[in-house]
Amino acid sequence: MTTPRFAIAILAAGKGTRLKSKLPKVLHQIAGLPLLSHVVRAASQIVPVEDIYCIIGHEAERVRQEIAPLGVQFVEQTEQRGTGHAIMQCRQALAAYDHVLVLSGDVPLIRPETIASVRDFHIARKSAMTILTARPPDPFGYGRIVRRAEHNTETDHVAAIVEQKQLTPAQETIGEINSGIYTFLVKELFARIDRLSTDNPHGEYYLTEIAAILGQEGLPVLALPTAHASEVLGVNTRRELAQLDAILRERKTRELMDNGVTIFKPETVMIDADVQIGADTVIEPFVQLLGNTALGEDCLVRSFSVLTNLKSGNGVKFHQGTIAEDSTVGDAAVIGPYARLRMGSQIGPEAHVGNFVETKKTRLGRGAKANHLTYLGDAEIGERTNIGAGTITCNYDGVNKSTTKIGAGAFIGSDTTLVAPVSIGDGAYIGAASCITKDVPADSLGLTRPEQVVKEGWATAKRVRLEAAKKAASQKK
Ligand code: UD1
Ligand code: MG
């Protein structure tokens, strides 16, 4: 027996009217990823990505751009005339397959295990159409499953799927809903799909109508109930978007805690789906870890820190209010409180970046320190160098960005401005409050401030003058 050829088609052409958004529905994000990406990821655990077909239509180019890097195929539905019409557009693309699993771009919590269970059931039962069904606490809005015969032994046969607006009063009590996830025999599906009507409140071709059409011809149309109703929740409104985002983030924090990460008040932290965290790292309340952030072991992320695409080694401390993105931090470094690492910052092991320090495209060597009130942009700073409070790299002349190079073991005095391009050699000293415009060689002193003047008794004399003037003024009145 040859192995059956499976494709996955993902319905993703709709506008998502109920979201009231400029952004197409399937690009709205939960846990930091578009809804459609979640579905594609689950699908790609079941079939190779080249067998995944995303049906796109509303804002198709935007969706294609965002999703194409995942390697899937696209089918265009230029006019959105319903879920059945969307599948009609796939006739050619699916001709080479035996079975198609249909997923919804707006049902993002579906797990690969569940998709596999639909596939396996479908094959084992030689079904023509298998429908994944569920019993959510509130079935309102979903298509309901009308079983063929309550008293028949084959109770998993489905007579019809009835959409919310077409339910008879008796059908309104049905708790079993259509998840929008199905498997079809490709040949039987396309032999009959042209028989779908638009005779419904929206005047659309409903894919759900195919259940009755196949069933009436005696083909097996079966329901497979899932025990995990939350997996098939759909996103049609902003409230549902927030609800599903919360479910995914809770799943994520639970998984991290199970792997040895401490998270205090996990309900207050926002951790995106792809974030990785090593064991024994501690996450305090109100932390956000976003994008592809990956933290090592034994780190501490204190409250109100927001780390985006940040890679860190082990034992790093991010004190309160650290804001960091697209940067790397080495082992045992200390960042914050209130530090800002902007794109391309590479903070070396054991380095310190303290309060109100901003870095951008800057490399800070092992054990180097910039502890207070400093801007380091386009800079390379050697090991163990100390950057005094209030140091500024003047990296931008209004047109070009230039680099500041500081060697190892150097000492930059407080309130120094370094006008780039400029280099400071290893072990050099810069006197406080200097404005450095020329290179300073290794082990020398660079200093630009004027000599200090001291006038003894000057202040006493001034006060005497001021008092006398004040007295004279009051006598005149
Ligand atoms: C659909 C089902 C309903 C099921 C529910 C599960 C139909 C008629 N109804 O309803 O039985 O309980 O899903 O979530 O299928 N889409 C297209 N092209 C179109 C229209 C829609 O690609 O022309 C896509 C949408 O982008 C979406 C998916 O199909 O990803 C489902 O469409 P939606 O309008 O959300 O259908 P529901 O009302 O949720
Ligand atoms: Mg929907």
Image: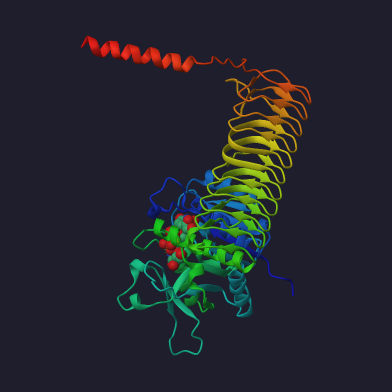
Q: Position of residue 380 (x, y in %)?
A: 71, 32
Q: Is residue 398 above or below residue 180?
A: above
Q: Quadrant of residue 39?
A: bottom right
Residue 336 x, y percent position in the rendering:
58, 45
Horizontally, residue 74 falls left or right of residue 166, namely right
Residue 265 seen: yes
Compared to residue 175, the image places residue 6 above or below, namely: above
How many dots with numbers? 0
Say which quarter of the image contains residue 256.
bottom right
As rendered, which of 296 and 300 lies closer to the eye?
Answer: 300
Location of residue 1 in the rendering, given as x and y in whole percent from the top left corner: 74, 75
Q: Residue at x 45, y 17 (%)?
A: 460
Q: Measuring 68% from the left and 42% from the top, which residue is drawn there?
A: 347
Asked which quadrant contains residue 281, the reply is bottom right
- Taking the image as shown, residue 460 lies to the left or right of residue 373, namely left
Quadrant in which the C terminus is drawn: top left
Residue 108 appearing in the image: no
The vertical placement of 186 against 475, above or below, is: below
Split into quadrants, the picture shows ligand 1 in the one at: bottom left
Q: Is residue 313 above or below residue 206?
A: above
- Relative to the observer, which residue lies in front, 217 or 461? 461
Image location (x, y in percent) of residue 38: 57, 58
Q: How is the image coloured?
A: rainbow
